[in-house]
Amino acid sequence: MAVTWTITNMEYTNDSDKGVVHAAWSASETDGDHTGTVSGMESYMPDSSAEGYVAWDLLTNAKVVSWVKATLGADEVTRVGEKIAAQIAESKTPSTAWGKPF
């Protein structure tokens, strides 16, 4: 299985450039009936004159996910995957349970 990264929403400037100010994201993986999910939000300072600027209408999930991963850095992207794997493992074999002895 592989972690799936999704941009869940974006805040953008209210001008003709519509530069991305915040990108909300979710990373998840499913193994049978067990799912792990981590989400967050990254902030950006859009500059339409900067080299590599991507116009709003040309943005894709893959492009913005690449920004998010670059912002997080390789170590944090790895930690996100580890957190998801831990959630799935806990779901498969819970370390606690609910109940009453009476």
Image: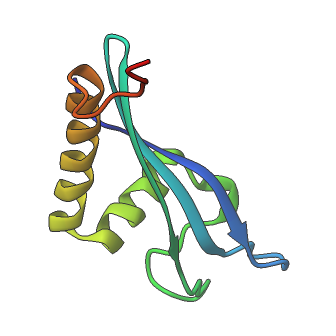
Q: Is residue 4 above or below residue 17?
A: above
Answer left or right for 87 relative to 17. left
Residue beneath the point at 30% across and 26% down? 91
- Image position of 91 (left or right of 100): left
Nearer to us in this view, 24 or 95 = 95
What is the x, y in percent for residue 5?
40, 43
- As drawn, 17 above or below 56: below
Q: Is residue 21 left or right of residue 96?
A: right
* Residue 88 placement (x, y as % from top left): 27, 30
Residue at the extreme front:
102
- Which color scheme is applied? rainbow
Instruction: Name the residue nearer the viewer: 75 or 92.
Output: 92
- Give the total of numbered labels: 0
> Residue 9, percent across and down?
66, 54
Q: Position of residue 93 (x, y in %)?
A: 20, 23
| Quadrant of the frame with the C terminus | top left
Give the residue drawn at x 20%, y 30%: 89
Seen in the picture, residue 88 relative to 45 is either above or below; the reply is above
- Residue at 57%, 64% in the rendered image: 23
Quarter placement of the N terminus: top left
The quadrant holding residue 11 is bottom right
Q: Which of the two residues, 20 or 23, is positioned nearer the viewer here?
A: 23
